Image: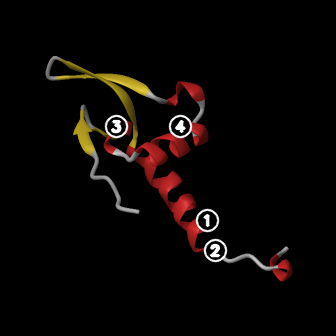
Amino acid sequence: MTKVVPMLIEDQCIIQLSQLSIDQQNDLRSFLPQNSVKKINFQGIELTDCIEFETYEYWLNIAQLDQNSAYTIWDL
């Protein structure tokens, strides 16, 4: 997976979910608590699908671990 570059708005690193592929958006939305997607006003534009970059980075690390893991019966 390609990592999205965050935007710095009001001393906060954020990303917009719309920067991600549809599959990634759906996976990330199912991972997030309902009220973690924020609306942020930036230069007169309302960005409606923002999350903290740290949250995205955490989810990305978990998603990459899941893709790279090969579990065996001995791992349980």
- State the residue position of label 4: 29
Please say if the residues under marks 2 and 1 sit with CB atoms less than 8 Å apart. yes
Q: CA distance from mark 3 to mark 1?
A: 23 Å
Question: Reading the chain from its start, which is encountered first: label 3 or label 2?
Answer: 3
Q: CA distance from mark 4 to mark 1?
A: 17 Å
Q: Residue furthest front?
A: 22
Which amino acid lies under the numbered mark 4 shown in the image of this protein? Arg
Q: CA distance from mark 2 to mark 1?
A: 5 Å
Q: Is residue 15 above or below residue 44?
A: below
- State the residue position of label 1: 66
Quadrant where the C terminus sits is bottom right
Q: CA distance from mark 3 to mark 2?
A: 28 Å
Neighbour tally class for label 4: few under 14, some 14-19, many 20 plus, Cα within 10 Å: some
Which element carries disc 1, helix, strand or loop?
Answer: helix
Q: CA distance from mark 2 to mark 4?
A: 22 Å
Question: Reading the chain from its start, which is encountered first: label 3 or label 1?
Answer: 3
Q: Which mark is residue 18?
A: 3
Q: Where residue 11 sits: x, y (%)?
A: 26, 37
Question: Reading the chain from its start, which is encountered first: label 4 or label 3?
Answer: 3
Q: Is residue 55 visible?
A: no
* 19 sits left or right of 29 in the view: left
- State the residue position of label 2: 69
Which amino acid lies under the numbered mark 2 shown in the image of this protein? Ser
Q: Where residue 55 sits: x, y (%)?
A: 48, 45
Q: Which mark is residue 56?
A: none
Which amino acid lies under the numbered mark 3 shown in the image of this protein? Ser
